[in-house]
Image (tube, rainbow, N blue to C red):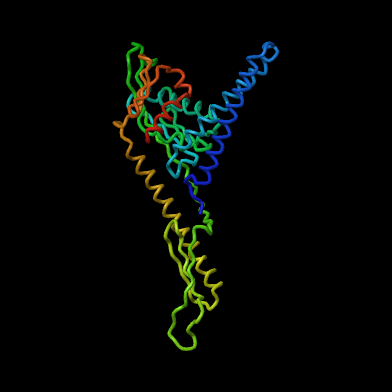
């Protein structure tokens, strides 16, 4: 059965990749140290620059893989949609929506993810009343799911002739793209197959061989059985068909629960559920849940929000 959850096999593969990248980093570091000890350093300057670039890329890949171990939800591997809506603050809040949209697009581009505009509603004077983006990439939802909540902006408004300080709000809702197609792939290792004698009314039609078949799907504990035919092979085939159908319904029910949960969470976002405060005049952006903060305002607005994301994942949000 296709599961959205990261499988044990994938986890093992991730661990192997982390080990390989770690070994590569050690090898690059060793080679760079050897070159630095040589007398003809100028001749190897270009090589050192290439190796330093390779080192930085390897370290970034290693960090991303290590963070991926913190993804715990079944939907973390999915692509996502992100809705941003303006709250109180009029034009200022609508401009804030556009700023947040730009921030997430910049983040997407820096991680080599893809984005597309799904819906956009222009503001009355400037900015946007609302926008919906689709973001596609490895563990896209896992990376951005903790961005859901209310984002508060405090700054001297460029739309105020008196240059007064304004506070405005925007709600961000991140939700996974749940595929409607359901593929049931039965793994033989997940099945327990028991055979037994078929029961009957007696007489010459009582089956004296163990032709009846009972199949238990161990992960879900779903059981099917068949004893209609005298052939154990045909009974097994029919029991497998029943199991396939029951697992399809099981997966369908799970997807419906996920969709209902998404809608419920969307309606639960209130303007009191602030997750992050952006105080531009004081050069301070602070996550109200994790207490992580930074003074590098422009860097964050340019999409460098990895520190906030990683801290929220580490703390289990």
Instruction: Please identify the residue farthest to the bottom as the structure is shown.
Output: 203
The relative height of residue 192 versus residue 314 in the rendered view (above or below) is below
- The C terminus - image quarter: top left
Where residue 84 sits, quadrant-wise, is top left
Going 53% across and 57% down the picture, which residue do you hit?
Answer: 187
Q: Position of residue 100 (x, y in %)?
A: 43, 26
Residue 215 at what x, y percent from top left? 47, 66
Location of residue 255 in the rendering, given as x and y in whole percent from the top left corner: 43, 50
Quadrant in which residue 267 is drawn = top left
Q: How many marks?
A: 0
Rendered position, 162 above or below 202: above
Q: Is residue 203 above or below residue 9?
A: below
Q: Position of residue 314 (x, y in %)?
A: 40, 32
Q: Residue at x 53, y 44 (%)?
A: 10
- Whether residue 122 sits left or right of residue 236 in the image: it is left
Using the image as rendered, state which of residue 246 and residue 135 is in the foreground.
246
Q: Is residue 194 above or below residue 300?
A: below
Identified at 35% across, 30% down, the residue is 150
| Residue occupying the far left of the picture | 272
């Amino acid at each position: 059965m296709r599961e959205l959850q990261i499988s044990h096999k994938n986890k093992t593969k991730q661990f192997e990749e982390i080990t390989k990248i770690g070994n590569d980093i050690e090898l690059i570091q060793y080679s760079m140290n050897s070159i630095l000890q040589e007398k003809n350093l100028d001749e190897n300057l270009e090589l050192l620059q290439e190796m330093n670039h390779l080192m930085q890329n390897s370290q970034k890949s290693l960090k991303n893989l290590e963070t991926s171990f913190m993804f715990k939800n079944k939907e973390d591997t999915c692509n996502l949609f992100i809705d941003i809506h303006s709250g109180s603050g009029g034009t200022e809040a609508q401009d804030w929506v556009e700023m947040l949209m730009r921030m997430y697009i910049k983040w997407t581009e820096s991680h080599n993810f893809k984005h597309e505009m799904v819906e956009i509603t222009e503001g009355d004077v400037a900015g946007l009343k609302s926008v919906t983006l689709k973001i596609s990439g490895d563990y896209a939802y896992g990376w951005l799911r903790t961005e859901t909540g209310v984002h508060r902006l405090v700054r001297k408004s460029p739309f105020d002739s008196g240059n007064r300080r304004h506070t405005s709000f925007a709600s961000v809702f991140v939700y996974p793209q749940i595929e409607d197609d359901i593929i049931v792939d039965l793994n033989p290792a997940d099945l327990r197959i028991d055979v037994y004698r078929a029961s009957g009314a007696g007489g010459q039609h009582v089956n004296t061989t163990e032709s009846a078949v009972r199949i238990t799907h161990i992960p879900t504990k779903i059981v099917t059985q068949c004893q209609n035919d005298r052939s154990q092979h045909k009974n097994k085939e029919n029991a497998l068909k029943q199991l396939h159908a029951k697992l399809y319904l099981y997966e369908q029910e799970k997807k419906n629960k996920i969709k209902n949960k998404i809608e419920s969470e969307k309606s639960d976002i209130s303007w009191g559920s602030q997750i992050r405060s952006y105080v531009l005049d004081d050069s301070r952006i602070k996550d109200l849940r994790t207490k992580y903060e930074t003074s590098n305002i422009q860097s964050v607005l340019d999409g460098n929000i990895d520190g906030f994301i990683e801290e929220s994942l580490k703390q289990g949000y």
